[in-house]
Image (cartoon, rainbow, N blue to C red):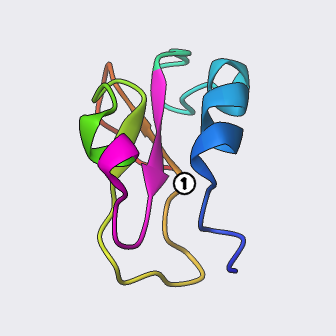
Amino acid sequence: MSENIIDFDDARESRGKKRCPSCRSTKVAAIVYGLPSPELVESPRDEVVLGGCVVSEDSPEWQCNDCGRQF
């Protein structure tokens, strides 16, 4: 598994520890790649953003819910 693919439970746990590099907000959502499970599809949009199925080494892991920056 690529280090850019974030496990849903790991994302929930570390979400509050991340800070947007642009606006410094802690309101961030994990970007999850691959075929989404029903749990991911039904998750609140402020927790998870579906990133699609194409992952590269520089794919962002997080998206700020305030300014929209992906990092």
Q: Is residue 23 left or right of residue 15?
A: left
Q: Amino acid at mark 1?
A: Glu
User: Which of the 4 quarters of the picture holds residue 61?
Assistant: bottom right
> What residue is at 72 percent from the left and 30 percent from the top?
14
Circle 1 sits in a helix, a strand or a loop, which is it?
loop
Q: Residue lying furthest front in this view?
A: 38
Q: Is residue 12 above or below residue 26?
A: below
> What residue is at 26 percent from the left and 35 percent from the top?
42
Tell me, yes or no, whether the highlighted magenta stretch contains residue 1: no
- Identify residue for label 1: 61
Tell me, yes or no, whether the highlighted magenta stretch contains residue 33: yes
x and y percent of residue 29 in the render? 45, 33
x and y percent of residue 52 in the render? 29, 70
Q: Is residue 21 left or right of residue 33?
A: right
Quadrant of the frame with the N terminus: bottom right
Numbered label tally: 1
Q: Is residue 7 above or below residue 35?
A: above
x and y percent of residue 31 in the render? 44, 51
The crowd level at tag 1 (other Cα within 10 Å; few <14, some 14-19, many 20+) is some
Q: Is residue 54 above or below residue 10?
A: below
> What residue is at 36 percent from the left and 84 percent from the top?
54
| Magenta segment | 28-39
